[in-house]
Image: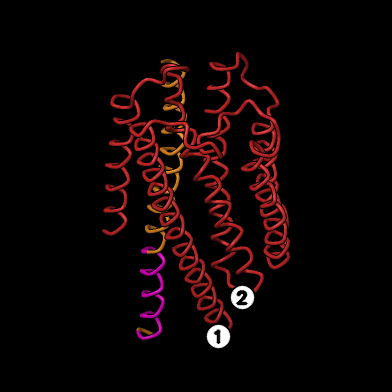
Protein backbone atom coordinates (compact mmCIF):
# COMPACT_ATOMS: atom_id res chain seq x y z
CA UNK A 1 0.00 0.00 0.00
CA UNK A 2 2.86 2.35 0.94
CA UNK A 3 4.56 1.46 -2.39
CA UNK A 4 1.41 2.39 -4.29
CA UNK A 5 1.18 5.71 -2.47
CA UNK A 6 4.79 6.44 -3.39
CA UNK A 7 4.08 5.51 -7.02
CA UNK A 8 0.97 7.72 -7.19
CA UNK A 9 2.91 10.58 -5.61
CA UNK A 10 5.76 10.10 -8.11
CA UNK A 11 3.35 9.98 -11.07
CA UNK A 12 1.42 13.05 -9.85
CA UNK A 13 4.63 14.98 -9.39
CA UNK A 14 5.96 13.86 -12.80
CA UNK A 15 2.74 14.95 -14.55
CA UNK A 16 2.97 18.35 -12.82
CA UNK A 17 6.65 18.65 -13.77
CA UNK A 18 5.92 17.69 -17.42
CA UNK A 19 3.05 20.20 -17.63
CA UNK A 20 5.29 22.93 -16.20
CA UNK A 21 8.19 21.96 -18.49
CA UNK A 22 6.25 21.84 -21.77
CA UNK A 23 3.41 24.31 -21.19
CA UNK A 24 4.01 26.89 -18.48
CA UNK A 25 7.82 27.36 -18.52
CA UNK A 26 8.73 30.41 -20.64
CA UNK A 27 10.61 30.11 -23.95
CA UNK A 28 14.34 30.78 -23.68
CA UNK A 29 15.38 34.03 -25.37
CA UNK A 30 18.54 32.52 -26.94
CA UNK A 31 17.86 28.84 -27.67
CA UNK A 32 14.05 28.91 -28.01
CA UNK A 33 12.03 25.80 -27.16
CA UNK A 34 14.91 23.31 -27.50
CA UNK A 35 16.16 24.26 -24.00
CA UNK A 36 13.12 22.33 -22.59
CA UNK A 37 15.21 19.13 -23.03
CA UNK A 38 16.96 20.39 -19.89
CA UNK A 39 13.93 19.36 -17.80
CA UNK A 40 14.64 15.71 -18.62
CA UNK A 41 18.40 15.85 -19.20
CA UNK A 42 19.35 17.47 -15.85
CA UNK A 43 17.07 15.26 -13.64
CA UNK A 44 18.37 12.12 -15.45
CA UNK A 45 21.99 13.17 -14.89
CA UNK A 46 21.24 14.06 -11.24
CA UNK A 47 19.58 10.68 -10.54
CA UNK A 48 22.48 8.96 -12.33
CA UNK A 49 25.00 10.67 -9.98
CA UNK A 50 22.75 9.99 -6.97
CA UNK A 51 22.45 6.29 -7.87
CA UNK A 52 26.22 5.89 -8.30
CA UNK A 53 26.84 7.74 -5.03
CA UNK A 54 24.48 5.33 -3.23
CA UNK A 55 26.27 2.48 -4.98
CA UNK A 56 29.59 3.78 -3.63
CA UNK A 57 28.26 4.11 -0.05
CA UNK A 58 26.74 0.61 -0.06
CA UNK A 59 29.91 -0.90 -1.56
CA UNK A 60 32.01 0.65 1.24
CA UNK A 61 29.47 -0.60 3.80
CA UNK A 62 29.66 -4.08 2.24
CA UNK A 63 33.46 -4.16 2.55
CA UNK A 64 33.23 -3.04 6.19
CA UNK A 65 30.28 -5.13 7.41
CA UNK A 66 30.07 -7.94 4.76
CA UNK A 67 26.26 -7.85 4.72
CA UNK A 68 24.64 -9.16 1.54
CA UNK A 69 22.01 -6.41 1.55
CA UNK A 70 24.70 -3.77 0.84
CA UNK A 71 26.13 -5.76 -2.08
CA UNK A 72 22.70 -6.13 -3.64
CA UNK A 73 21.81 -2.45 -3.09
CA UNK A 74 25.11 -1.46 -4.75
CA UNK A 75 24.21 -3.61 -7.76
CA UNK A 76 20.59 -2.37 -8.02
CA UNK A 77 21.61 1.30 -7.75
CA UNK A 78 24.36 0.79 -10.36
CA UNK A 79 21.84 -0.74 -12.82
CA UNK A 80 19.36 2.10 -12.25
CA UNK A 81 22.20 4.63 -12.55
CA UNK A 82 23.17 3.11 -15.90
CA UNK A 83 19.61 3.51 -17.23
CA UNK A 84 19.39 7.14 -16.08
CA UNK A 85 22.92 7.73 -17.41
CA UNK A 86 21.92 6.39 -20.82
CA UNK A 87 18.91 8.76 -20.87
CA UNK A 88 21.20 11.68 -19.89
CA UNK A 89 23.67 10.79 -22.67
CA UNK A 90 20.96 10.37 -25.32
CA UNK A 91 19.05 13.52 -24.35
CA UNK A 92 22.35 15.44 -24.23
CA UNK A 93 23.34 14.36 -27.71
CA UNK A 94 19.88 15.21 -29.11
CA UNK A 95 20.23 18.68 -27.57
CA UNK A 96 23.83 18.94 -28.90
CA UNK A 97 22.60 18.20 -32.41
CA UNK A 98 20.05 21.00 -32.18
CA UNK A 99 22.41 23.48 -30.51
CA UNK A 100 25.85 22.61 -31.90
CA UNK A 101 24.91 20.86 -35.15
CA UNK A 102 26.29 17.42 -34.29
CA UNK A 103 25.11 14.57 -32.04
CA UNK A 104 28.58 13.87 -30.67
CA UNK A 105 31.35 16.48 -30.31
CA UNK A 106 33.84 14.86 -27.89
CA UNK A 107 33.10 17.75 -25.54
CA UNK A 108 34.69 17.20 -22.06
CA UNK A 109 31.27 16.66 -20.41
CA UNK A 110 30.12 14.24 -23.13
CA UNK A 111 33.40 12.32 -23.04
CA UNK A 112 33.70 12.09 -19.24
CA UNK A 113 30.05 11.03 -18.90
CA UNK A 114 30.60 8.31 -21.51
CA UNK A 115 33.69 7.14 -19.55
CA UNK A 116 31.55 7.10 -16.37
CA UNK A 117 28.85 5.06 -18.11
CA UNK A 118 31.36 2.53 -19.51
CA UNK A 119 33.05 2.26 -16.07
CA UNK A 120 29.75 1.23 -14.45
CA UNK A 121 28.98 -1.11 -17.33
CA UNK A 122 32.28 -2.76 -16.35
CA UNK A 123 30.97 -3.15 -12.79
CA UNK A 124 27.87 -5.00 -14.02
CA UNK A 125 30.08 -7.16 -16.28
CA UNK A 126 32.18 -8.11 -13.24
CA UNK A 127 29.08 -9.01 -11.26
CA UNK A 128 27.83 -11.18 -14.12
CA UNK A 129 31.09 -12.84 -15.10
CA UNK A 130 32.78 -14.02 -11.86
CA UNK A 131 31.51 -17.42 -10.74
CA UNK A 132 32.76 -17.49 -7.15
CA UNK A 133 30.03 -15.66 -5.19
CA UNK A 134 32.22 -14.28 -2.38
CA UNK A 135 35.02 -13.17 -4.76
CA UNK A 136 32.44 -11.55 -7.05
CA UNK A 137 31.07 -9.47 -4.18
CA UNK A 138 34.48 -8.27 -2.94
CA UNK A 139 35.99 -7.58 -6.38
CA UNK A 140 32.73 -5.88 -7.42
CA UNK A 141 32.76 -3.61 -4.34
CA UNK A 142 36.43 -2.64 -4.83
CA UNK A 143 35.85 -1.98 -8.55
CA UNK A 144 32.71 0.05 -7.73
CA UNK A 145 34.66 2.31 -5.35
CA UNK A 146 37.30 2.87 -8.05
CA UNK A 147 34.67 3.49 -10.74
CA UNK A 148 33.14 6.25 -8.61
CA UNK A 149 36.19 8.44 -9.41
CA UNK A 150 34.53 9.03 -12.80
CA UNK A 151 31.53 10.74 -11.11
CA UNK A 152 33.40 13.86 -9.84
CA UNK A 153 35.40 13.76 -13.09
CA UNK A 154 32.17 14.02 -15.11
CA UNK A 155 30.57 16.57 -12.77
CA UNK A 156 33.59 18.87 -12.56
CA UNK A 157 34.61 18.53 -16.23
CA UNK A 158 32.66 21.69 -17.18
CA UNK A 159 34.45 23.80 -14.57
CA UNK A 160 37.95 22.33 -14.96
CA UNK A 161 38.19 22.03 -18.76
CA UNK A 162 37.09 24.60 -21.36
CA UNK A 163 33.78 23.31 -22.73
CA UNK A 164 30.77 24.18 -24.85
CA UNK A 165 28.42 22.63 -22.29
CA UNK A 166 26.15 25.27 -20.68
CA UNK A 167 26.50 25.88 -16.94
CA UNK A 168 23.24 26.46 -15.07
CA UNK A 169 24.97 27.27 -11.79
CA UNK A 170 28.32 29.07 -11.99
CA UNK A 171 30.38 31.60 -10.04
CA UNK A 172 28.52 34.43 -11.77
CA UNK A 173 25.11 33.08 -10.65
CA UNK A 174 22.19 31.02 -11.96
CA UNK A 175 21.53 31.31 -15.69
CA UNK A 176 17.78 30.53 -15.42
CA UNK A 177 14.81 32.77 -14.69
CA UNK A 178 12.72 32.03 -11.59
CA UNK A 179 9.89 30.14 -13.43
CA UNK A 180 12.51 28.04 -15.30
CA UNK A 181 14.37 27.29 -12.06
CA UNK A 182 11.15 26.35 -10.23
CA UNK A 183 10.18 23.98 -13.07
CA UNK A 184 13.65 22.43 -12.98
CA UNK A 185 13.47 21.91 -9.20
CA UNK A 186 10.03 20.23 -9.51
CA UNK A 187 11.41 17.98 -12.30
CA UNK A 188 14.42 17.08 -10.14
CA UNK A 189 12.16 16.22 -7.19
CA UNK A 190 9.81 14.13 -9.38
CA UNK A 191 12.72 12.16 -10.89
CA UNK A 192 14.18 11.52 -7.42
CA UNK A 193 10.86 10.21 -6.06
CA UNK A 194 10.48 7.92 -9.10
CA UNK A 195 14.00 6.63 -8.53
CA UNK A 196 13.25 5.95 -4.84
CA UNK A 197 10.12 4.01 -5.88
CA UNK A 198 12.07 1.89 -8.41
CA UNK A 199 14.80 1.25 -5.82
CA UNK A 200 12.26 0.09 -3.24
CA UNK A 201 10.54 -2.14 -5.81
CA UNK A 202 13.87 -3.72 -6.78
CA UNK A 203 14.75 -4.25 -3.09
CA UNK A 204 11.39 -5.99 -2.48
CA UNK A 205 12.10 -8.30 -5.41
CA UNK A 206 15.51 -9.10 -3.97
CA UNK A 207 14.07 -10.02 -0.53
CA UNK A 208 11.41 -12.20 -2.24
CA UNK A 209 14.17 -13.93 -4.23
CA UNK A 210 15.96 -14.69 -0.96
CA UNK A 211 12.75 -16.15 0.54
CA UNK A 212 12.15 -18.30 -2.57
CA UNK A 213 15.75 -19.58 -2.54
CA UNK A 214 15.50 -20.41 1.18
CA UNK A 215 12.23 -22.31 0.63
CA UNK A 216 13.65 -24.21 -2.37
CA UNK A 217 16.62 -25.20 -0.18
CA UNK A 218 14.33 -26.23 2.70
CA UNK A 219 12.16 -28.35 0.37
CA UNK A 220 15.25 -29.98 -1.10
CA UNK A 221 16.55 -30.77 2.39
CA UNK A 222 13.22 -32.31 3.41
CA UNK A 223 12.85 -34.47 0.31
CA UNK A 224 16.55 -35.46 0.60
CA UNK A 225 15.99 -36.45 4.24
CA UNK A 226 13.00 -38.63 3.29
CA UNK A 227 14.96 -40.39 0.53
CA UNK A 228 17.80 -41.17 2.98
CA UNK A 229 15.28 -42.51 5.52
CA UNK B 1 9.66 20.35 -30.98
CA UNK B 2 10.30 16.89 -32.44
CA UNK B 3 13.59 16.68 -30.50
CA UNK B 4 11.83 17.45 -27.21
CA UNK B 5 9.16 14.84 -27.99
CA UNK B 6 11.88 12.27 -28.81
CA UNK B 7 13.70 12.93 -25.52
CA UNK B 8 10.42 12.56 -23.58
CA UNK B 9 9.69 9.26 -25.33
CA UNK B 10 13.19 7.94 -24.51
CA UNK B 11 12.87 8.94 -20.84
CA UNK B 12 9.37 7.61 -20.22
CA UNK B 13 9.89 4.47 -22.29
CA UNK B 14 13.07 3.60 -20.33
CA UNK B 15 11.27 4.06 -17.02
CA UNK B 16 8.26 2.09 -18.26
CA UNK B 17 10.47 -0.81 -19.39
CA UNK B 18 12.20 -0.98 -15.96
CA UNK B 19 8.86 -0.69 -14.17
CA UNK B 20 7.23 -3.46 -16.25
CA UNK B 21 10.28 -5.73 -15.94
CA UNK B 22 10.41 -5.29 -12.14
CA UNK B 23 6.65 -5.73 -11.80
CA UNK B 24 6.71 -8.92 -13.89
CA UNK B 25 9.47 -10.35 -11.67
CA UNK B 26 7.49 -9.34 -8.57
CA UNK B 27 4.36 -11.15 -9.81
CA UNK B 28 6.35 -14.28 -10.79
CA UNK B 29 8.21 -14.39 -7.47
CA UNK B 30 5.02 -13.88 -5.42
CA UNK B 31 3.39 -16.75 -7.35
CA UNK B 32 6.45 -19.01 -6.88
CA UNK B 33 6.59 -18.16 -3.17
CA UNK B 34 2.94 -19.13 -2.59
CA UNK B 35 3.49 -22.38 -4.57
CA UNK B 36 6.56 -23.23 -2.48
CA UNK B 37 4.83 -22.40 0.79
CA UNK B 38 1.90 -24.62 -0.23
CA UNK B 39 4.27 -27.47 -1.18
CA UNK B 40 6.18 -27.16 2.08
CA UNK B 41 2.98 -27.36 4.13
CA UNK B 42 1.98 -30.53 2.26
CA UNK B 43 5.42 -32.04 2.87
CA UNK B 44 5.05 -31.30 6.58
CA UNK B 45 1.60 -32.94 6.66
CA UNK B 46 2.77 -36.12 4.88
CA UNK B 47 4.80 -37.61 7.81
CA UNK B 48 1.75 -37.15 10.07
CA UNK B 49 -0.35 -39.29 7.67
CA UNK B 50 2.34 -41.97 7.61
Q: Position of residue A130 (x, y in %)?
A: 73, 57
Residue appearing at x 38%, y 59% in the figure? B30
Q: Which residues are magenta?
A: B34-48
Q: Main secondary structure of the magenta part?
A: helix
Which residue: 57% across, 35% down? A86
* Rendered-image quadrant of the N terminus of chain A: bottom left
**1 vs 2, front mark:** 2
Residue beneath disc 1:
A229
Specify the label residue B42 is tagged with.
none
Q: Quadrant of the C terminus of chain A?
A: bottom right
Count the numbered circles shown: 2
Quick one: SS at disc 1? loop
Q: What hue does chain A carry in this figure?
A: red
Answer left or right for A220 relative to A13: right
Q: Residue at x 46, y 42 (%)?
A: B18
Q: Residue B2: image x %, image y %?
A: 43, 15
Picture colour for chain B? orange
Name which residue lies at 70% across and 65% down: A138
Write down the chain letter for disc 2. Answer: A
Amino acid sequence: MRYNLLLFFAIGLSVTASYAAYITAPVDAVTGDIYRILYIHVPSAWVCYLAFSLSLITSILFLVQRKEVYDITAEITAILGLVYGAVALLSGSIWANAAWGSYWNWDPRETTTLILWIAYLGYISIKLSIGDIERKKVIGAVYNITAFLTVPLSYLSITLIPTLHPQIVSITGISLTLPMLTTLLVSLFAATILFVYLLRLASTIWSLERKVNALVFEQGEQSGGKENA
Amino acid sequence: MLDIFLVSVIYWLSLLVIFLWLNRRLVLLTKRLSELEGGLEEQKKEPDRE
